[in-house]
């Protein structure tokens, strides 16, 4: 049996998508959460000096998106055709574009600048990203990102929505999904999966 260890900080952040994949796939892993001195000691041994890092039988791999995609492929969560898998990759790249191009600007801004940047994002570019995900979901018609069961695509959407909620909460704003029926459906489908439901109830409660 393969031994998996996922090392990250005690936050959802860039590690939670992989944790959700393990849970959905019902595959055991060590959920190693480090902080302070322990991280200072570990950092030089990490491939890029950053986390998350996945160990697969002792082999260390970094980059959260690569890790999530690898796990999803290993556990059969990338759809049932190459085209479905491509759709999920496309969503992942759209997420990366939004994250690196927009969300990191808000994260890294000085505290006083955050509300203005967040408002501009919510009223501007965010709509383009949400419209894209809604459009893809509407095309598939099932309430799942591809096919008719949960895959990495749905977990990714769930992860994106959670990340947006967290960022907006930090500036006392709310993510408005009232006219986003398809995104709401995915959220409900992910949250009602028994394995995910159990994890959401038992996972460490963290602010991010
Ligand atoms: N592109 C990388 C980013 C990795 C990264 O910047 N990780 C941050 C936490 S989200 C980190 O390890 N920060 C602590 C440090 O650099 O010492 C990924 O997606 O995994």
Image: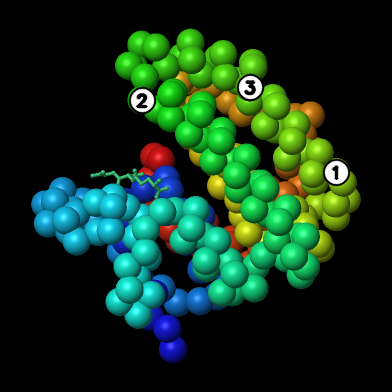
The percent position of residue 75, horizontal first and vertical second, equals 59, 74
Quadrant showing the N terminus = bottom left
Query: Looking at the image, which residue sits at the far bottom?
Result: 1
Between residues 115 and 191, which one lies in front from this camera angle?
A: 115
Determine the image quadrant of residue 59: bottom left
**20 vs 131: above or below:** below
Q: Secondary structure at mark 3?
A: helix
Quadrant showing the C terminus = top left
Q: Which residue is mark 3?
A: 125
**171 vs 101: above or below:** above
Q: Which residue is mark 1?
A: 138
Determine the image quadrant of residue 83: bottom right
Q: Which residue is mark 2?
A: 108
Q: Secondary structure at mark 2?
A: helix
Residue 191 in sight:
no
Q: Are marks 2 and 3 in contact (CB under 8 Å)?
A: no
- Whole-angstrom CA distance, mark 2 to mark 3, is 18 Å
Crowding around mark 2 (Cα neighbors within 10 Å: few <14, some 14 to 19, many 20+) is few
Q: Taking the image as four quarters, which one is ligand 1 found in?
A: top left
Residue drawn at x 32%, y 16% as measured from the top left: 110
The mark nearer the N terminus, 2 or 1, is 2
Q: Is mark 1 within 8 Å of ligand 1?
A: no
Residue drawn at x 54%, y 41% as measured from the top left: 96
Residue drawn at x 36%, y 19% as measured from the top left: 109
Q: Is mark 2 within 8 Å of ligand 1?
A: no
| Number of numbered discs on residues | 3
């Amino acid at each position: 049996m393969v031994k998996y260890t996922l090392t990250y900080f005690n936050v959802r952040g860039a590690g939670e998508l992989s944790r959700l994949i393990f849970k959905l796939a019902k595959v055991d892993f060590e959920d190693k959460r480090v902080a302070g001195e322990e991280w200072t000691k570990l950092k030089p041994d990490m491939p890029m000096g950053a986390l998350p890092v996945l160990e697969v039988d002792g082999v260390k791999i970094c980059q959260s998106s690569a890790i999530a995609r690898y796990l999803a492929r290993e556990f059969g969560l990338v759809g049932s055709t190459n085209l479905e898998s491509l759709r999920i990759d496309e969503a992942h790249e759209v997420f990366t574009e939004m994250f690196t191009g927009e969300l990191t600007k808000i994260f890294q801004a000085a505290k006083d600048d955050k509300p203005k940047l967040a408002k501009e994002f919510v009223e501007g570019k965010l709509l383009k990203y949400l419209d894209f995900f809604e459009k893809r979901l509407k095309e598939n018609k099932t309430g799942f990102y591809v096919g008719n069961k949960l895959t990495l695509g749905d977990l990714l959407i769930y992860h994106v929505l959670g990340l947006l909620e967290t960022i907006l909460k930090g500036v006392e704003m709310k993510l408005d999904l009232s006219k986003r029926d398809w995104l709401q459906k995915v959220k409900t489908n992910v949250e009602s999966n028994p394995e995910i439901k159990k994890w959401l109830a038992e996972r460490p409660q963290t602010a991010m």
